[in-house]
Image (spheres, grey):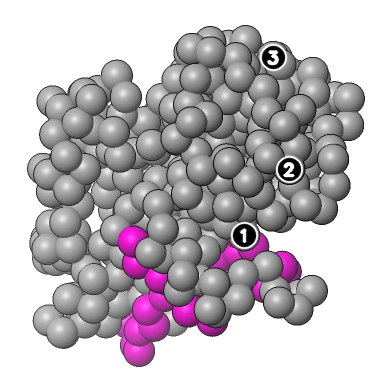
Amino acid sequence: MSDDMLVSPEDAQRLSCMGHRQIFGEVMGVLAQEGPSLTVVVSDYGRRLNLGRFRQTLPEGFVQCGIAEQNQVEVASALANEGLTTFAVGYASFLSARALDQVRVSLGIMGSPAILVGVSGGCDSGALGPSHMAIEDRGNMRQIPGMTVISPADGAEFAAVLMELARNPRPAYVCMNDGDGRNLHPDGIPAAGVGAPQELCARDGAGVTLLSSGTIGSRALDAARMLGRRGVPCQLVALPTLKPFGLCDACVADGCRLLVSVEEHARMGGLGSAVAEWLADAGHGTPLLRLGMPDAYLKADTRDALLDRAGLSPEGIAQSVEERLSRLP
């Protein structure tokens, strides 16, 4: 692979067939070959993260904290402050809530360059009930000054984000979310493009711009194509980086009638809120429809069933867009 490509087209296709836990372990194994400063701190979850190669290469770099996410963040912060490239991995619901005070103090106030990786973002662990659903995690992390917050669209982008953060450690939170296993980066990912907005579906003429964050982008892509077949020109732009947030003017130009945010997260605090803030600061008057999880804790179910119940199936997204369009002047 050339120096300017973090993920080749071939690897992007291969990674699309892997779960994010497998990808995490594979990337850590590769990074371990590059030097002895890599450390992975886990909270009881290490055996499920494909870390065999990493632990064989850097056995002293694996730190097990047990079921103690608050302690895990403190340990990761201390290691990062000593100059080690440190990834702390645990359930997204617990890292972003139970340990939020430790994140605020250590990564926010102290600026420790630890990289937090939230396992089972969104509804991935919905079968375990609302305690394990991470639908507030990115909103919580966006509130911490100095934090980078990223929700990758697919396996290739997840791998590229991990590699980029290893090259440039900083206080960061990455949402790990398996999604639908689609490859949304068939051309690979260059080092210069990690976390940047990506147009997944173009539109001609006035219409709708869908904005997605995370692996729900594949459902948004199906909805965009569905709307196009129904005579609604529709663009889709994936926005993995929620902080620092950058929405391009092109997304609201050329006669765009409606912006629609689509996320596997509460409608408050995540992508929809970031877009609304950007529109307000930029002085844009484009109408915004925010689609996401309801302001409620849903009963345990599979990820697909939970998203469908929240109106986040491709058909549900398309219907919500059509309904809002019908009410626009």
Of tags 2 and 3, the one toward the viewer is: 2
Question: At x 16% / y 39%, what residue is drawn?
Answer: 302
Residue 123 drawn at (x, y percent)? 28, 38
Viewer can see residue 249: no
- Depth check: give the residue in front, 270 or 181: 181
Q: Are marks 2 and 3 in contact (CB under 8 Å)?
A: no
Q: Residues within 10 Å of mark 1 (few under 14, many from 20)?
A: many
Left or right of residue 295, residue 19 in this image: right
Of tags 1 and 2, the one toward the viewer is: 2
Q: Residues within 10 Å of mark 2 (few under 14, many from 20)?
A: some
Q: Residues within 10 Å of mark 3 (few under 14, many from 20)?
A: many
Question: At x 56% / y 46%, what residue is drawn?
Answer: 25
On residue 282, the disc is: none
Disc 2/disc 3 C-alpha distance (Å): 25 Å
Question: At x 47% / y 49%, what residue is drawn?
Answer: 22
Mark nearer the N terminus (1 vs 3): 3
Could you tell me which quadrant the C terminus lies in? bottom left
Find disc 3 in the rendering and name its residue: 74
- Depth check: give the residue in front, 109 or 178: 178
Mark nearer the N terminus (2 vs 3): 2
**Residue ranking furthest to the front:** 56
Give the magenta part as a residue range.
181-209
On residue 160, the disc is: 1
Q: Is residue 208 magenta?
A: yes
- Depth check: give the residue in front, 269 or 191: 191
Q: Amino acid at mark 2?
A: Thr
Find disc 2 in the rendering and name its residue: 57
**Residue ranking furthest to the right:** 82
